[in-house]
Image (spheres, rainbow, N blue to C red):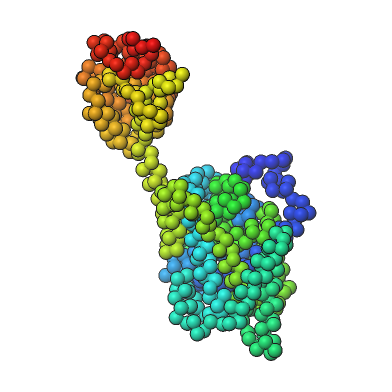
Protein backbone atom coordinates (compact mmCIF):
# COMPACT_ATOMS: atom_id res chain seq x y z
CA UNK A 1 0.00 0.00 0.00
CA UNK A 2 2.94 2.30 0.62
CA UNK A 3 3.89 2.38 -3.05
CA UNK A 4 0.31 3.26 -3.97
CA UNK A 5 0.23 6.16 -1.56
CA UNK A 6 3.52 7.55 -2.80
CA UNK A 7 2.94 7.32 -6.51
CA UNK A 8 0.85 10.46 -7.20
CA UNK A 9 3.42 12.78 -5.58
CA UNK A 10 6.67 10.90 -5.88
CA UNK A 11 9.08 13.79 -5.51
CA UNK A 12 12.13 13.75 -3.33
CA UNK A 13 13.34 10.82 -1.32
CA UNK A 14 11.82 8.69 1.41
CA UNK A 15 8.18 8.29 2.31
CA UNK A 16 7.38 12.00 2.48
CA UNK A 17 4.70 13.17 0.00
CA UNK A 18 5.55 15.94 -2.45
CA UNK A 19 3.74 18.69 -0.56
CA UNK A 20 6.21 18.32 2.32
CA UNK A 21 8.93 19.66 0.00
CA UNK A 22 6.85 22.81 -0.63
CA UNK A 23 6.59 23.85 3.00
CA UNK A 24 8.11 27.25 3.76
CA UNK A 25 7.49 29.92 6.35
CA UNK A 26 5.13 31.62 3.90
CA UNK A 27 3.13 28.46 3.19
CA UNK A 28 2.90 27.66 6.90
CA UNK A 29 1.48 31.13 7.54
CA UNK A 30 -1.01 30.80 4.67
CA UNK A 31 -2.06 27.30 5.74
CA UNK A 32 -2.49 28.41 9.33
CA UNK A 33 -4.79 31.28 8.35
CA UNK A 34 -6.77 29.06 5.98
CA UNK A 35 -7.00 26.40 8.68
CA UNK A 36 -8.31 28.91 11.17
CA UNK A 37 -11.01 29.94 8.72
CA UNK A 38 -11.89 26.27 8.11
CA UNK A 39 -12.18 25.68 11.85
CA UNK A 40 -14.50 28.65 12.26
CA UNK A 41 -16.67 27.69 9.25
CA UNK A 42 -17.14 24.08 10.33
CA UNK A 43 -18.46 24.97 13.78
CA UNK A 44 -22.05 25.80 12.76
CA UNK A 45 -21.94 23.36 9.84
CA UNK A 46 -20.87 20.46 12.03
CA UNK A 47 -23.57 21.12 14.60
CA UNK A 48 -26.27 21.51 11.92
CA UNK A 49 -25.23 18.48 9.88
CA UNK A 50 -25.05 16.23 12.96
CA UNK A 51 -28.61 17.26 13.79
CA UNK A 52 -29.65 16.42 10.22
CA UNK A 53 -28.01 12.99 10.63
CA UNK A 54 -30.03 12.29 13.80
CA UNK A 55 -26.94 12.53 16.01
CA UNK A 56 -26.05 14.74 18.98
CA UNK A 57 -24.42 18.05 17.88
CA UNK A 58 -20.93 17.14 19.08
CA UNK A 59 -20.69 14.31 16.55
CA UNK A 60 -20.59 16.85 13.76
CA UNK A 61 -17.56 18.42 15.44
CA UNK A 62 -15.93 15.02 15.94
CA UNK A 63 -16.39 14.24 12.23
CA UNK A 64 -14.47 17.40 11.32
CA UNK A 65 -11.38 16.35 13.32
CA UNK A 66 -9.88 12.87 12.79
CA UNK A 67 -11.31 12.26 9.26
CA UNK A 68 -10.09 15.69 8.15
CA UNK A 69 -6.52 14.95 9.29
CA UNK A 70 -6.36 11.43 7.83
CA UNK A 71 -7.85 12.43 4.47
CA UNK A 72 -5.37 15.29 4.19
CA UNK A 73 -2.43 12.99 4.94
CA UNK A 74 -3.34 10.19 2.54
CA UNK A 75 -5.55 11.84 -0.10
CA UNK A 76 -4.56 13.27 -3.45
CA UNK A 77 -5.91 16.82 -3.29
CA UNK A 78 -3.96 19.45 -1.39
CA UNK A 79 -7.02 21.65 -0.83
CA UNK A 80 -10.01 19.38 -0.18
CA UNK A 81 -11.21 19.42 3.43
CA UNK A 82 -13.13 16.38 4.59
CA UNK A 83 -15.79 16.28 7.24
CA UNK A 84 -19.57 16.16 7.70
CA UNK A 85 -21.73 17.08 4.70
CA UNK A 86 -25.39 17.76 4.13
CA UNK A 87 -25.89 14.88 1.67
CA UNK A 88 -24.17 12.29 3.88
CA UNK A 89 -26.15 13.45 6.91
CA UNK A 90 -29.53 13.25 5.20
CA UNK A 91 -28.73 9.89 3.58
CA UNK A 92 -27.56 8.43 6.91
CA UNK A 93 -30.74 9.51 8.69
CA UNK A 94 -32.93 8.09 5.92
CA UNK A 95 -31.16 4.73 6.00
CA UNK A 96 -30.67 4.25 9.75
CA UNK A 97 -33.93 5.70 11.11
CA UNK A 98 -35.87 2.47 10.37
CA UNK A 99 -33.30 0.49 12.41
CA UNK A 100 -32.97 2.60 15.55
CA UNK A 101 -34.29 5.75 17.18
CA UNK A 102 -32.26 8.79 16.03
CA UNK A 103 -30.09 10.16 18.81
CA UNK A 104 -30.20 6.95 20.88
CA UNK A 105 -27.10 5.01 21.88
CA UNK A 106 -28.06 2.22 19.47
CA UNK A 107 -28.42 4.69 16.62
CA UNK A 108 -25.02 6.27 17.38
CA UNK A 109 -23.44 2.81 17.46
CA UNK A 110 -24.90 1.95 14.05
CA UNK A 111 -23.68 5.27 12.59
CA UNK A 112 -20.12 4.53 13.72
CA UNK A 113 -20.23 0.98 12.35
CA UNK A 114 -21.47 2.28 8.99
CA UNK A 115 -18.59 4.79 8.88
CA UNK A 116 -16.09 1.94 9.36
CA UNK A 117 -17.75 -0.21 6.67
CA UNK A 118 -17.89 2.71 4.23
CA UNK A 119 -14.21 3.37 4.88
CA UNK A 120 -13.31 -0.27 4.20
CA UNK A 121 -15.21 -0.22 0.89
CA UNK A 122 -13.64 3.06 -0.19
CA UNK A 123 -10.18 1.79 0.68
CA UNK A 124 -10.78 -1.39 -1.32
CA UNK A 125 -11.86 0.64 -4.36
CA UNK A 126 -8.69 2.70 -4.15
CA UNK A 127 -6.33 -0.24 -3.59
CA UNK A 128 -7.87 -2.16 -6.51
CA UNK A 129 -7.31 0.97 -8.60
CA UNK A 130 -10.92 1.22 -9.68
CA UNK A 131 -10.80 5.00 -9.44
CA UNK A 132 -10.53 5.29 -13.22
CA UNK A 133 -14.32 5.37 -13.23
CA UNK A 134 -13.94 8.96 -12.02
CA UNK A 135 -12.42 9.86 -15.40
CA UNK A 136 -15.92 9.73 -16.83
CA UNK A 137 -16.79 12.88 -14.87
CA UNK A 138 -16.18 15.46 -17.59
CA UNK A 139 -15.29 19.15 -17.08
CA UNK A 140 -18.79 20.12 -18.19
CA UNK A 141 -20.29 17.85 -15.54
CA UNK A 142 -18.01 19.40 -12.95
CA UNK A 143 -18.97 22.88 -14.11
CA UNK A 144 -22.66 22.10 -13.65
CA UNK A 145 -22.11 20.21 -10.41
CA UNK A 146 -20.01 22.98 -8.90
CA UNK A 147 -22.55 25.64 -9.85
CA UNK A 148 -25.45 23.57 -8.56
CA UNK A 149 -23.76 22.64 -5.29
CA UNK A 150 -22.72 26.26 -4.78
CA UNK A 151 -26.30 27.35 -5.36
CA UNK A 152 -27.50 24.86 -2.74
CA UNK A 153 -24.93 26.13 -0.26
CA UNK A 154 -26.11 29.67 -0.91
CA UNK A 155 -29.80 28.78 -0.57
CA UNK A 156 -29.20 26.98 2.72
CA UNK A 157 -27.27 30.01 3.92
CA UNK A 158 -30.23 32.33 3.35
CA UNK A 159 -31.96 31.27 6.57
CA UNK A 160 -29.07 32.48 8.73
CA UNK A 161 -28.42 35.52 6.53
CA UNK A 162 -32.00 36.69 7.15
CA UNK A 163 -32.14 35.40 10.72
CA UNK A 164 -35.00 32.95 10.12
CA UNK A 165 -35.86 29.95 12.30
CA UNK A 166 -36.34 27.34 9.55
CA UNK A 167 -37.45 23.84 10.67
CA UNK A 168 -34.67 21.23 10.68
CA UNK A 169 -34.49 19.11 7.53
CA UNK A 170 -35.98 21.82 5.29
CA UNK A 171 -34.72 21.55 1.70
CA UNK A 172 -32.85 24.34 -0.07
CA UNK A 173 -35.93 25.41 -1.99
CA UNK A 174 -37.96 24.97 1.18
CA UNK A 175 -35.73 27.64 2.74
CA UNK A 176 -36.61 30.01 -0.12
CA UNK A 177 -40.32 29.22 0.27
CA UNK A 178 -40.11 29.79 4.01
CA UNK A 179 -38.37 33.11 3.43
CA UNK A 180 -41.05 34.30 1.01
CA UNK A 181 -43.84 33.23 3.37
CA UNK A 182 -42.25 34.83 6.44
CA UNK A 183 -40.82 38.10 5.18
CA UNK A 184 -42.19 39.78 8.29
CA UNK A 185 -39.93 37.53 10.40
CA UNK A 186 -36.70 38.67 8.69
CA UNK A 187 -34.23 40.07 11.22
CA UNK A 188 -32.93 43.51 10.15
CA UNK A 189 -29.98 43.03 12.49
CA UNK A 190 -29.01 39.72 10.84
CA UNK A 191 -29.26 41.28 7.38
CA UNK A 192 -27.10 44.20 8.54
CA UNK A 193 -24.49 41.81 9.91
CA UNK A 194 -24.55 39.75 6.71
CA UNK A 195 -24.22 42.74 4.38
CA UNK A 196 -21.53 44.26 6.58
CA UNK A 197 -19.57 41.02 6.56
CA UNK A 198 -19.74 40.90 2.76
CA UNK A 199 -18.66 44.52 2.43
CA UNK A 200 -15.67 44.12 4.75
CA UNK A 201 -14.62 40.88 3.03
CA UNK A 202 -14.80 42.36 -0.47
CA UNK A 203 -12.98 45.51 0.62
CA UNK A 204 -10.18 43.51 2.29
CA UNK A 205 -9.81 41.30 -0.77
CA UNK A 206 -9.56 44.27 -3.12
CA UNK A 207 -7.05 45.90 -0.82
CA UNK A 208 -4.69 42.94 -0.97
CA UNK A 209 -5.04 39.29 -1.97
CA UNK A 210 -2.47 38.44 0.69
CA UNK A 211 -4.72 39.55 3.51
CA UNK A 212 -6.82 36.88 5.30
CA UNK A 213 -9.87 38.65 3.89
CA UNK A 214 -12.36 35.99 4.95
CA UNK A 215 -11.27 36.13 8.58
CA UNK A 216 -11.26 39.92 8.42
CA UNK A 217 -14.81 39.76 7.09
CA UNK A 218 -15.92 37.49 9.94
CA UNK A 219 -14.33 39.83 12.48
CA UNK A 220 -16.11 42.74 10.79
CA UNK A 221 -19.40 40.89 11.11
CA UNK A 222 -18.74 40.24 14.79
CA UNK A 223 -18.02 43.92 15.32
CA UNK A 224 -21.26 44.95 13.63
CA UNK A 225 -23.20 42.45 15.73
CA UNK A 226 -21.67 43.87 18.91
CA UNK A 227 -22.55 47.42 17.89
CA UNK A 228 -26.14 46.49 17.06
CA UNK A 229 -26.44 44.80 20.44
CA UNK A 230 -25.60 48.01 22.31
CA UNK A 231 -28.50 50.06 23.70
CA UNK A 232 -27.39 53.08 21.69
CA UNK A 233 -28.03 51.13 18.48
CA UNK A 234 -31.32 49.60 19.55
CA UNK A 235 -30.03 46.55 21.41
CA UNK A 236 -30.80 44.26 18.49
CA UNK A 237 -29.70 40.65 18.93
CA UNK A 238 -28.71 38.24 16.20
CA UNK A 239 -28.52 34.46 16.28
CA UNK A 240 -25.14 33.09 17.26
CA UNK A 241 -23.46 29.68 17.13
CA UNK A 242 -24.21 28.98 20.77
CA UNK A 243 -22.56 26.68 23.29
CA UNK A 244 -20.21 24.11 21.77
CA UNK A 245 -19.43 20.85 23.63
CA UNK A 246 -15.91 19.45 23.85
CA UNK A 247 -14.43 18.90 20.39
CA UNK A 248 -11.94 16.20 21.42
CA UNK A 249 -13.31 13.01 19.81
CA UNK A 250 -13.33 10.03 22.21
CA UNK A 251 -12.01 6.65 21.07
CA UNK A 252 -14.73 4.04 20.93
CA UNK A 253 -15.02 0.58 19.41
CA UNK A 254 -18.62 0.20 18.17
CA UNK A 255 -20.37 -3.11 18.69
CA UNK A 256 -22.22 -4.90 15.92
CA UNK A 257 -24.29 -8.08 15.82
CA UNK A 258 -23.76 -10.54 13.00
CA UNK A 259 -27.50 -10.54 12.32
CA UNK A 260 -27.49 -6.81 11.52
CA UNK A 261 -24.29 -6.92 9.43
CA UNK A 262 -25.89 -7.86 6.03
CA UNK A 263 -28.30 -4.93 6.20
CA UNK A 264 -25.55 -2.56 7.34
CA UNK A 265 -23.38 -3.69 4.42
CA UNK A 266 -26.14 -2.71 2.00
CA UNK A 267 -26.53 0.67 3.67
CA UNK A 268 -22.76 1.17 3.64
CA UNK A 269 -22.54 0.33 -0.07
CA UNK A 270 -25.12 3.01 -0.88
CA UNK A 271 -23.38 5.56 1.35
CA UNK A 272 -20.04 4.67 -0.26
CA UNK A 273 -21.45 5.77 -3.61
CA UNK A 274 -22.80 8.95 -2.01
CA UNK A 275 -19.49 9.81 -0.34
CA UNK A 276 -17.21 8.90 -3.25
CA UNK A 277 -19.42 10.68 -5.78
CA UNK A 278 -19.19 13.85 -3.72
CA UNK A 279 -15.50 13.51 -2.85
CA UNK A 280 -14.13 12.97 -6.34
CA UNK A 281 -16.45 15.59 -7.84
CA UNK A 282 -15.39 18.14 -5.24
CA UNK A 283 -11.70 17.20 -5.64
CA UNK A 284 -11.95 17.66 -9.40
CA UNK A 285 -13.91 20.89 -9.01
CA UNK A 286 -11.22 22.32 -6.72
CA UNK A 287 -8.53 21.02 -9.09
CA UNK A 288 -10.06 23.03 -11.93
CA UNK A 289 -9.38 26.16 -9.86
CA UNK A 290 -6.00 25.15 -8.42
CA UNK A 291 -4.53 23.36 -11.45
CA UNK A 292 -3.32 20.50 -9.24
CA UNK A 293 -3.65 17.01 -10.80
CA UNK A 294 -5.89 14.57 -8.94
CA UNK A 295 -5.24 10.84 -8.54
CA UNK A 296 -8.68 9.28 -8.09
CA UNK A 297 -7.32 6.04 -6.62
CA UNK A 298 -5.30 7.89 -4.02
CA UNK A 299 -8.27 10.10 -3.24
CA UNK A 300 -10.38 7.00 -2.59
CA UNK A 301 -7.64 5.54 -0.38
CA UNK A 302 -7.49 8.76 1.62
CA UNK A 303 -11.26 8.89 2.05
CA UNK A 304 -11.35 5.21 2.99
CA UNK A 305 -8.69 5.57 5.65
CA UNK A 306 -10.36 8.72 7.00
CA UNK A 307 -13.69 6.95 7.49
CA UNK A 308 -12.03 3.84 8.93
CA UNK A 309 -10.17 5.91 11.50
CA UNK A 310 -13.11 8.23 12.06
CA UNK A 311 -15.46 5.38 12.90
CA UNK A 312 -13.27 4.52 15.89
CA UNK A 313 -13.12 8.17 16.98
CA UNK A 314 -16.84 8.90 17.23
CA UNK A 315 -17.20 10.18 13.64
CA UNK A 316 -19.98 9.34 11.22
CA UNK A 317 -19.53 9.12 7.42
CA UNK A 318 -17.39 11.95 6.07
CA UNK A 319 -16.21 13.08 2.65
CA UNK A 320 -14.87 16.13 0.88
CA UNK A 321 -16.87 19.25 1.70
CA UNK A 322 -17.36 21.87 -1.02
CA UNK A 323 -18.47 24.42 1.58
CA UNK A 324 -15.07 24.13 3.31
CA UNK A 325 -12.78 23.11 0.43
CA UNK A 326 -13.46 26.13 -1.76
CA UNK A 327 -13.09 28.66 1.09
CA UNK A 328 -9.90 26.80 2.05
CA UNK A 329 -8.50 27.30 -1.45
CA UNK A 330 -9.77 30.86 -1.76
CA UNK A 331 -8.25 31.73 1.62
CA UNK A 332 -4.81 30.85 0.24
CA UNK A 333 -4.18 27.29 1.50
CA UNK A 334 -0.96 25.94 -0.01
CA UNK A 335 -0.68 22.36 1.32
CA UNK A 336 -2.77 19.75 3.18
CA UNK A 337 -1.42 21.24 6.39
CA UNK A 338 -4.33 23.70 6.16
CA UNK A 339 -6.77 20.82 6.73
CA UNK A 340 -4.70 19.48 9.62
CA UNK A 341 -4.45 22.94 11.16
CA UNK A 342 -8.22 23.27 10.77
CA UNK A 343 -8.85 20.06 12.74
CA UNK A 344 -6.36 20.90 15.48
CA UNK A 345 -7.53 24.51 15.74
CA UNK A 346 -11.13 23.35 15.90
CA UNK A 347 -10.35 21.34 19.03
CA UNK A 348 -8.35 24.19 20.54
CA UNK A 349 -10.95 26.82 19.69
CA UNK A 350 -13.80 24.86 21.18
CA UNK A 351 -11.76 23.95 24.25
CA UNK A 352 -10.23 27.35 24.96
CA UNK A 353 -12.54 29.88 23.36
CA UNK A 354 -15.94 28.23 23.55
CA UNK A 355 -17.62 31.26 25.22
CA UNK A 356 -16.28 33.63 22.55
CA UNK A 357 -17.02 31.33 19.64
CA UNK A 358 -20.52 30.86 20.96
CA UNK A 359 -21.11 34.54 20.11
CA UNK A 360 -20.08 34.21 16.46
CA UNK A 361 -23.06 35.49 14.39
CA UNK A 362 -24.61 32.91 12.12
CA UNK A 363 -25.41 35.72 9.67
CA UNK A 364 -21.69 36.48 9.30
CA UNK A 365 -20.91 32.83 8.47
CA UNK A 366 -23.85 32.71 6.06
CA UNK A 367 -22.58 35.85 4.32
CA UNK A 368 -19.18 34.22 3.88
CA UNK A 369 -20.73 31.12 2.34
CA UNK A 370 -22.87 33.25 0.02
CA UNK A 371 -19.76 35.02 -1.26
CA UNK A 372 -18.01 31.73 -1.90
CA UNK A 373 -21.12 30.32 -3.60
CA UNK A 374 -21.41 33.31 -5.92
CA UNK A 375 -17.80 32.88 -7.00
CA UNK A 376 -18.34 29.21 -7.86
CA UNK A 377 -21.08 29.78 -10.45
CA UNK A 378 -18.91 30.32 -13.54
CA UNK A 379 -21.31 32.28 -15.73
CA UNK A 380 -18.54 33.33 -18.15
CA UNK A 381 -17.57 29.77 -18.92
CA UNK A 382 -21.20 28.77 -19.36
CA UNK A 383 -21.60 31.56 -21.93
CA UNK A 384 -18.53 30.35 -23.82
CA UNK A 385 -19.88 26.81 -23.87
CA UNK A 386 -23.23 28.10 -25.15
CA UNK A 387 -21.43 29.79 -28.06
CA UNK A 388 -18.84 27.14 -28.83
CA UNK A 389 -20.30 23.74 -27.91
CA UNK A 390 -24.04 23.36 -27.47
CA UNK A 391 -23.88 19.71 -26.38
CA UNK A 392 -21.38 20.44 -23.60
CA UNK A 393 -23.50 23.42 -22.55
CA UNK A 394 -26.54 21.14 -22.33
CA UNK A 395 -24.55 18.69 -20.18
CA UNK A 396 -23.47 21.46 -17.82
CA UNK A 397 -27.00 22.87 -17.51
CA UNK A 398 -28.47 19.37 -17.09
CA UNK A 399 -26.03 18.58 -14.30
CA UNK A 400 -26.66 21.97 -12.70
CA UNK A 401 -30.42 21.34 -12.66
CA UNK A 402 -29.99 17.76 -11.42
CA UNK A 403 -27.77 18.96 -8.56
CA UNK A 404 -30.56 21.27 -7.43
CA UNK A 405 -33.33 18.65 -7.44
CA UNK A 406 -31.54 15.30 -6.91
CA UNK A 407 -29.02 13.94 -4.44
CA UNK A 408 -25.50 15.06 -5.27
CA UNK A 409 -24.16 11.63 -6.27
CA UNK A 410 -27.18 11.06 -8.53
CA UNK A 411 -26.61 14.43 -10.16
CA UNK A 412 -22.99 13.51 -10.92
CA UNK A 413 -24.11 10.12 -12.25
CA UNK A 414 -26.74 11.75 -14.46
CA UNK A 415 -24.24 14.31 -15.77
CA UNK A 416 -21.75 11.55 -16.55
CA UNK A 417 -24.46 9.62 -18.39
CA UNK A 418 -25.29 12.73 -20.43
CA UNK A 419 -21.60 13.08 -21.30
CA UNK A 420 -21.44 9.43 -22.32
CA UNK A 421 -24.55 9.77 -24.49
CA UNK A 422 -23.11 12.86 -26.18
CA UNK A 423 -19.81 11.05 -26.75
CA UNK A 424 -21.56 8.00 -28.21
CA UNK A 425 -23.61 10.22 -30.50
CA UNK A 426 -20.47 11.95 -31.78
CA UNK A 427 -18.54 8.71 -32.28
CA UNK A 428 -21.52 7.05 -33.93
CA UNK A 429 -21.21 9.51 -36.81
CA UNK A 430 -17.60 9.30 -38.02
CA UNK A 431 -16.84 11.52 -40.98
CA UNK A 432 -16.77 9.74 -44.36
CA UNK A 433 -15.27 12.36 -46.68
CA UNK A 434 -14.95 12.22 -50.45
CA UNK A 435 -11.44 13.18 -51.64
CA UNK A 436 -9.75 14.32 -54.82
CA UNK A 437 -6.13 15.25 -55.57
CA UNK A 438 -6.20 19.05 -55.39
CA UNK A 439 -5.03 20.25 -58.83
CA UNK A 440 -4.20 23.67 -57.35
CA UNK A 441 -1.77 22.09 -54.91
CA UNK A 442 1.70 21.36 -56.36
CA UNK A 443 1.89 18.27 -54.15
CA UNK A 444 -1.57 17.13 -55.37
CA UNK A 445 -2.62 16.25 -51.81
CA UNK A 446 -5.85 14.30 -51.42
CA UNK A 447 -8.31 16.93 -50.15
CA UNK A 448 -11.96 16.67 -49.01
CA UNK A 449 -14.33 18.11 -51.61
CA UNK A 450 -15.79 20.56 -49.06
CA UNK A 451 -12.34 21.99 -48.31
CA UNK A 452 -11.51 22.89 -51.94
CA UNK A 453 -11.40 26.54 -52.91
CA UNK A 454 -13.09 25.71 -56.23
CA UNK A 455 -15.13 22.78 -57.50
CA UNK A 456 -13.10 19.92 -58.98
CA UNK A 457 -14.30 16.70 -60.62
CA UNK A 458 -13.95 13.21 -59.15
CA UNK A 459 -12.75 10.20 -61.08
CA UNK A 460 -15.83 8.60 -62.69
CA UNK A 461 -14.58 5.08 -61.83
CA UNK A 462 -12.56 5.36 -58.58
CA UNK A 463 -14.04 6.74 -55.39
CA UNK A 464 -11.62 8.14 -52.81
CA UNK A 465 -12.86 8.40 -49.24
CA UNK A 466 -11.35 9.05 -45.84
CA UNK A 467 -12.84 7.39 -42.76
CA UNK A 468 -12.32 9.55 -39.64
CA UNK A 469 -13.12 7.68 -36.45
CA UNK A 470 -13.96 4.25 -35.10
CA UNK A 471 -16.12 1.89 -37.16
CA UNK A 472 -17.85 0.02 -34.34
CA UNK A 473 -21.37 -1.29 -33.84
CA UNK A 474 -22.75 2.16 -32.98
CA UNK A 475 -21.23 3.78 -36.09
CA UNK A 476 -21.80 1.01 -38.64
CA UNK A 477 -25.23 2.21 -39.72
CA UNK A 478 -23.99 5.74 -40.36
CA UNK A 479 -20.96 4.57 -42.38
CA UNK A 480 -23.12 2.06 -44.28
CA UNK A 481 -25.62 4.78 -45.20
CA UNK A 482 -22.85 7.12 -46.37
CA UNK A 483 -21.23 4.46 -48.55
CA UNK A 484 -24.62 3.43 -49.95
CA UNK A 485 -25.43 7.05 -50.82
CA UNK A 486 -22.10 7.35 -52.64
CA UNK A 487 -22.81 4.22 -54.69
CA UNK A 488 -26.33 5.41 -55.49
CA UNK A 489 -25.26 8.90 -56.62
CA UNK A 490 -22.29 7.71 -58.66
CA UNK A 491 -22.89 4.11 -59.74
CA UNK A 492 -19.99 4.28 -62.18
CA UNK A 493 -17.51 4.51 -59.30
CA UNK A 494 -17.25 0.75 -58.86
CA UNK A 495 -13.82 0.94 -57.23
CA UNK A 496 -13.35 2.37 -53.73
CA UNK A 497 -9.99 3.38 -52.21
CA UNK A 498 -10.42 4.08 -48.48
CA UNK A 499 -7.85 6.20 -46.67
CA UNK A 500 -7.98 4.23 -43.44
CA UNK A 501 -5.24 5.79 -41.35
CA UNK A 502 -7.85 7.75 -39.37
CA UNK A 503 -10.01 4.66 -38.85
CA UNK A 504 -8.65 4.04 -35.37
CA UNK A 505 -10.79 1.10 -34.26
CA UNK A 506 -12.98 -1.62 -35.72
CA UNK A 507 -15.05 -4.33 -34.09
CA UNK A 508 -16.79 -7.47 -35.36
CA UNK A 509 -19.76 -5.56 -36.76
CA UNK A 510 -17.40 -3.06 -38.39
CA UNK A 511 -15.51 -5.89 -40.07
CA UNK A 512 -18.81 -7.25 -41.39
CA UNK A 513 -19.54 -3.83 -42.91
CA UNK A 514 -16.38 -4.05 -45.01
CA UNK A 515 -17.22 -7.66 -45.90
CA UNK A 516 -20.50 -6.41 -47.34
CA UNK A 517 -18.85 -3.48 -49.10
CA UNK A 518 -16.26 -5.79 -50.67
CA UNK A 519 -18.96 -8.13 -51.92
CA UNK A 520 -21.01 -5.25 -53.36
CA UNK A 521 -18.01 -3.74 -55.16
CA UNK A 522 -16.80 -7.00 -56.64
CA UNK A 523 -20.30 -8.05 -57.69
CA UNK A 524 -20.51 -4.76 -59.64
CA UNK A 525 -17.19 -5.49 -61.34
CA UNK A 526 -15.10 -3.19 -59.16
CA UNK A 527 -12.94 -3.55 -56.08
CA UNK A 528 -12.20 -2.35 -52.55
CA UNK A 529 -8.75 -1.10 -51.47
CA UNK A 530 -7.26 0.41 -48.33
CA UNK A 531 -4.45 2.87 -47.74
CA UNK A 532 -2.47 2.52 -44.49
CA UNK A 533 -4.96 0.83 -42.15
CA UNK A 534 -3.75 0.74 -38.54
CA UNK A 535 -2.15 -2.39 -37.13
CA UNK A 536 -5.08 -2.97 -34.74
CA UNK A 537 -7.48 -2.81 -37.66
CA UNK A 538 -5.38 -5.28 -39.64
CA UNK A 539 -5.34 -7.65 -36.68
CA UNK A 540 -9.14 -7.44 -36.43
CA UNK A 541 -9.42 -8.22 -40.14
CA UNK A 542 -7.05 -11.15 -39.73
CA UNK A 543 -9.12 -12.59 -36.86
CA UNK A 544 -12.35 -12.39 -38.85
CA UNK A 545 -10.84 -13.72 -42.08
CA UNK A 546 -11.60 -10.51 -43.96
CA UNK A 547 -7.90 -9.92 -44.64
CA UNK A 548 -7.69 -13.16 -46.62
CA UNK A 549 -10.82 -12.41 -48.63
CA UNK A 550 -9.63 -8.87 -49.35
CA UNK A 551 -6.14 -10.00 -50.36
CA UNK A 552 -2.82 -8.52 -49.29
CA UNK A 553 -2.47 -6.93 -52.74
CA UNK A 554 -5.33 -4.57 -51.96
CA UNK A 555 -3.73 -2.94 -48.92
CA UNK A 556 -1.14 -0.23 -49.64
CA UNK A 557 1.39 1.70 -47.58
CA UNK A 558 1.51 4.78 -49.82
CA UNK A 559 -0.86 6.66 -52.08
CA UNK A 560 1.46 6.40 -55.09
CA UNK A 561 1.65 2.64 -54.64
CA UNK A 562 -2.14 2.46 -54.36
CA UNK A 563 -2.73 4.50 -57.52
CA UNK A 564 -0.14 2.55 -59.52
CA UNK A 565 -1.92 -0.68 -58.55
CA UNK A 566 -5.55 0.43 -58.82
CA UNK A 567 -5.63 2.68 -61.92
CA UNK A 568 -4.67 -0.14 -64.34
CA UNK A 569 -7.73 -2.07 -63.07
CA UNK A 570 -10.11 0.64 -64.29
CA UNK A 571 -12.02 0.33 -67.58
CA UNK A 572 -9.59 1.71 -70.17
CA UNK A 573 -12.39 2.50 -72.61
CA UNK A 574 -13.89 4.92 -70.11
CA UNK A 575 -10.45 6.38 -69.33
CA UNK A 576 -9.79 7.18 -73.02
CA UNK A 577 -12.90 9.36 -73.30
CA UNK A 578 -12.64 10.82 -69.77
CA UNK A 579 -12.01 14.56 -69.54
CA UNK A 580 -11.63 14.75 -65.77
CA UNK A 581 -7.97 13.62 -65.72
CA UNK A 582 -8.03 13.58 -61.92
CA UNK A 583 -4.71 11.76 -61.49
CA UNK A 584 -1.33 12.42 -63.03
CA UNK A 585 -1.29 8.74 -63.98
CA UNK A 586 -4.39 9.14 -66.14
CA UNK A 587 -3.82 8.72 -69.94
CA UNK A 588 -3.17 12.12 -71.48
CA UNK A 589 -2.58 13.87 -68.12
CA UNK A 590 0.26 16.36 -67.88
Quadrant in which the C terminus appears: top left
The single residue placed furthest to the front in the displayed view is 454
Height in image: 21 above or below 534? Answer: below
Quadrant in which the N terminus appears: top right
Q: Is residue 451 left or right of residue 111?
A: left
Residue 80 placed where, x, y %? 60, 56
The single residue placed furthest to the left in the displayed view is 523
Residue 383 placed where, x, y %? 48, 54
- Which residue is more in the foreground, 590 or 540? 590
Instruction: State the residue at coordinates (46%, 47%).
Output: 388
Q: Is residue 345 left or right of residue 367?
A: right
Height in image: 305 above or below 39? Answer: above
Q: Is residue 414 visible?
A: yes
Residue 219 placed where, x, y %? 70, 72
Q: Is residue 106 visible?
A: no
Q: Is residue 240 left or right of residue 522?
A: right
Height in image: 102 above or below 87? Answer: below
Instruction: State the residue at coordinates (42%, 60%).
Output: 402
- Which residue is more in the foreground, 230 or 510? 230
Instruction: State the residue at coordinates (46%, 78%).
Output: 180
Residue 495 placed where, x, y %? 28, 19
Instruction: State the residue at coordinates (70%, 66%).
Output: 204
Height in image: 186 above or below 567? Answer: below
- The answer to which image quadrant residue 33 occupies is bottom right
- Which residue is more in the foreground, 163 or 317? 163
Q: How many marks?
A: 0
Amino acid sequence: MTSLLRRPHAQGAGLLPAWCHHITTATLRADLMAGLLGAVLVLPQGVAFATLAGLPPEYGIYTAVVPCIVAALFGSSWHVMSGPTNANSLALLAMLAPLATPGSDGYINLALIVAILVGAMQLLIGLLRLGSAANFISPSVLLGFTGGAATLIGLYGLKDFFGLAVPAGTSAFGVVTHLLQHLDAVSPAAVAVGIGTMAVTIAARRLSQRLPFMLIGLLGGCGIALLLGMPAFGGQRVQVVGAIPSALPPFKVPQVSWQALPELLGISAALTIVALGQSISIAKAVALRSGQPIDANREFVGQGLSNLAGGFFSSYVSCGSLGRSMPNFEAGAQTPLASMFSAVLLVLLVTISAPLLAQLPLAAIAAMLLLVSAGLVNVGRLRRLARENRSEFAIAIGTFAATLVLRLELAVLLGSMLSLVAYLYRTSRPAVRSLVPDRNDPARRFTPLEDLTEAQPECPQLKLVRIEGAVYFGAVQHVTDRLHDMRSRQPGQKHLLAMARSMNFIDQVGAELWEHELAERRAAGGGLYFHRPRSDVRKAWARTGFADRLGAGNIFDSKDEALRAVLPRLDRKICVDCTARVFRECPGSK
